[in-house]
Image: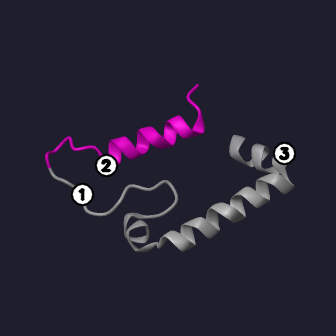
Amino acid sequence: MPSILQQQLQQVSTTWGDPTGKRQRGKPSLLFTAQEAADVDLQSLYELAQEGEQMYCEHPMVVATATQS
């Protein structure tokens, strides 16, 4: 069974691949819609990553259980 990350990467490659020869606008993202990804700034992304890391460090089993569902 593919991991969640493998499934997400497959989805991004399918969505953002170029099978029709047409290029989609925006940036591929697992966290945001194309419009949100285009508008998010690096500071916001950094803060989101810090919050995720802090949550994981405080409660690693909760995060692990949530990602398995």
Residue 37 part of the magenta-drawn span: no
Q: Which residues are magenta?
A: 1-21
Cα distance, mark 2 to mark 3? 33 Å
Residue at image position (77%, 60%) is 54
- Asked where in the image residue 36 lies, by quadrant, the reply is bottom left
**Cβ atoms under marks 2 and 1 closer than 8 Å:** yes
Residue 16 part of the magenta-drawn span: yes
Q: Secondary structure at mark 2?
A: helix
Q: Is residue 67 above or below residue 6?
A: below
Cα distance, mark 3 to mark 1? 38 Å
Q: Residues within 10 Å of mark 2 (few under 14, many from 20)?
A: some
- Asked where in the image residue 18 lies, by quadrant, the reply is top left
Which residue bears the numbered disc 3?
61
Q: Position of residue 1 (x, y in %)?
A: 58, 25
Side of 35 relative to 66 (left or right) = left
Q: Work out whether residue 48 can be spotted.
A: yes
Which residue bears the numbered disc 2?
16
The tag on residue 48 is none
Which residue bears the numbered disc 1?
24
- Amino acid type indicated by mark 2: Trp
**Cβ atoms under marks 2 and 3 closer than 8 Å:** no
**Sequence-wise, which precedes: disc 3 or disc 1?**
1
Count of residue discs: 3
Q: Position of residue 55 (x, y in %)?
A: 78, 59
Q: Residues within 10 Å of mark 1 (few under 14, many from 20)?
A: few
Q: Secondary structure at mark 3?
A: helix
**Sequence-wise, which precedes: disc 2 or disc 3?**
2
Side of 19 relative to 56 (left or right) = left
**Sequence-wise, which precedes: disc 2 or disc 1?**
2
Residue at image position (37%, 69%) is 38
Q: Position of residue 50 (x, y in %)?
A: 68, 63
Cα distance, mark 2 to mark 1? 7 Å
